[in-house]
Image (cartoon, rainbow, N blue to C red):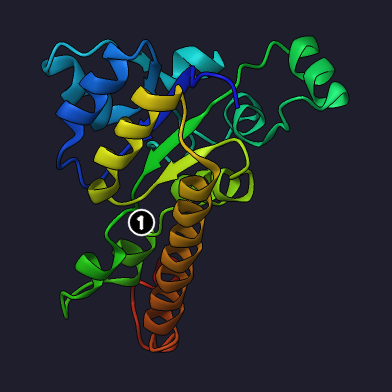
Amino acid sequence: MGKMQRALISLTDKSGIEEFARQLQDLGIEILSTGGTAKKMRENTIAVKDVAEFTGFPEMLDGRVKTLHPKVHGGILFLRGNASHEEQMAKHGLQQVDLVAVNLYAFDNATSDPGCSVANAIENIDIGGPTMLRAAAKNFQYVTVIVDPADYPQVVSEIKEHGNTTLATRFRLAVKVFQLTSTYDTAIAAWLSKVDTDTNTHFAGGK
């Protein structure tokens, strides 16, 4: 594994992010981010590049589309050392993303309110987050993926020692991702399955 170059950080739970991002910055790792996460890091004098600048495409549709872009997912998914992938990356001006730190919209928190409407529940279904997490976890041979702030110290320690994380750590963190996304999707399906589509006035625009 080569030296870690670039991290994408987009968090709902921002606990510990200032120290973690500053340590990555001190290690010479470029940080990409979005929205409130980028704002928080800038407030703490951490250099960050907006994902919109990285992709050359603005956030749109009230933030529903911001990380769903080939420059993000190509950077995460490409196989380092694969000649065909390397050629395509160069041809399309893509850059590798070596670390993805993401946690998801708090669907359970939103739907724990008995008055939560279907419309509000749907707005709290994360799309870009699970997509990035699954992509990074699939490519664990090369990409470090973090969903839990408790894993920040070990990741930083390994980067300091080796220039990157170990394969064993990347695999462990990938398993953690699939456990999370499975639980997340199960919670969404369980809540939506209880919706009475005949009486809920917020279903399908109230029709």
Please report the residue visible at 77 percent of the width from the left and 24 percent of the height from the top: 81
The answer to whether residue 182 is visible is yes
In which quadrant of the rendered image does the N terminus lie? top right
Report whether 142 appears left or right of 16.
Answer: right
List x then y, in percent, for residue 14. 19, 40
> Residue 48's x, y, as percent?
31, 14
Q: Nearer the viewer, residue 67 or 168?
A: 168
Q: Residue at x 54, y 13 (%)?
A: 56
At mark 1, the secondary structure is helix
Q: Residues within 10 Å of mark 1 (few under 14, many from 20)?
A: some
Please, is residue 183 above or below residue 85 in the view? below
Residue at the extreme right: 84
Where residue 120 sits: x, y (%)?
29, 62
Between 43 and 164, the one lying in front of the other is: 164
Q: Above or below — where is 30 with respect to 69? A: above
- Residue at 45% across / 43% down in the picture? 145
Q: Amino acid at mark 1?
A: Glu
Q: How many marks?
A: 1
The C terminus appears in which quarter of the rendering? bottom left
Q: Is residue 33 visible?
A: no
Dividing the picture into quadrants, the one containing residue 202 is bottom left
Q: At which x and y percent is residue 149?
A: 24, 46
Q: Residue at x 58, y 20 (%)?
A: 2
Q: Which residue is mark 1?
A: 123
Q: Residue 123 appears in which quarter of the rendering? A: bottom left
Q: Residue furthest front?
A: 161
Vertical arrangement, residue 204 with respect to residue 194, above or below = above
